[in-house]
Image: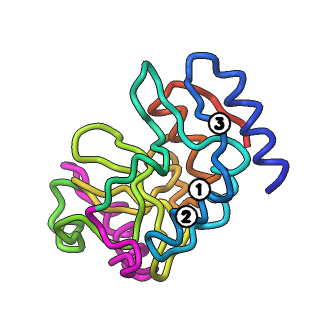
Amino acid sequence: MDNRLARLRASLAAATELEVLPPTSEADVAGFEARYGITLPLEYRRFLLEVAEGISLGGEPQLYALRDFAGGVDLTRPFWYGAADADAILAAIAAAGPGGPLADRAVMALQRSGDPDGCLTLAGNGGNDFSVIVVSGEQPGRMWRTGELDAPETRALYDGGGDVEPLSFLDWIVPWASCFLGVELDT
């Protein structure tokens, strides 16, 4: 992980179009964890401490800083999708009809309504589409898309390929930055 974080730090430093917030302090991370009764997933925690607290583009936050967390969800309650749910959702999406997953009844039957607890929103991807990291429940450290469609983040969401393995934070940030920031990062 040390090498991946070092490459990511160098990539972000080279991306001059981005406004990269400096890393946060151990005291700030520990204070956030204590205030909300959680432990942040290791990859994300180390990113905050060693790489950046957040990323903005054109003055708008893209990868939210801890200080941007406004609450509204209970981070200590388990994230409402477990590993079996993730597998079922991915299988239903893969089998979705020509209208895509949002028009497919099997996919929609697996979705829950509302804002899920147990996850921290890291990025708004436009409209009602968010990337979150699971902090409580069966899948800590896994990235999910929530909002219009709840599904584990996979590379296939970004490049259309067949890789549908759920992503951890460091696996997620590279395709996310390419898709939403137009920046190629290296980890």
Mark 3 or 1: the one toward you: 1
Q: CA distance from mark 3 to mark 2?
A: 18 Å
**Residue placed at 43% from the left, 75% from the top?**
87
Mark seen at residue 28: 1
Residue located beneath label 3 in the image? 22
Is 41 or 166 nearer to us in this picture? Answer: 41
Q: Secondary structure at mark 3?
A: loop
Disc 2 + disc 1, Cβ < 8 Å: yes
Q: Quadrant of residue 184?
A: top right
Q: Crowding at label 3, few (<14), some or many (≥20) Cα neighbours within 10 Å?
A: some
Query: Is residue 77 rendered magenta in the image?
Result: yes
Q: Residue flagged by tag 2: what amino acid is it?
A: Gly
Side (left or right) of 6 relative to 186: right
Residue located beneath label 2 in the image? 31
Side (left or right) of 156 relative to 75: right
Q: Earlier in the sequence, mark 3 or mark 1?
A: 3
Q: Crowding at label 1, few (<14), some or many (≥20) Cα neighbours within 10 Å?
A: some
**Residue placed at 44% from the left, 32% from the top?**
180
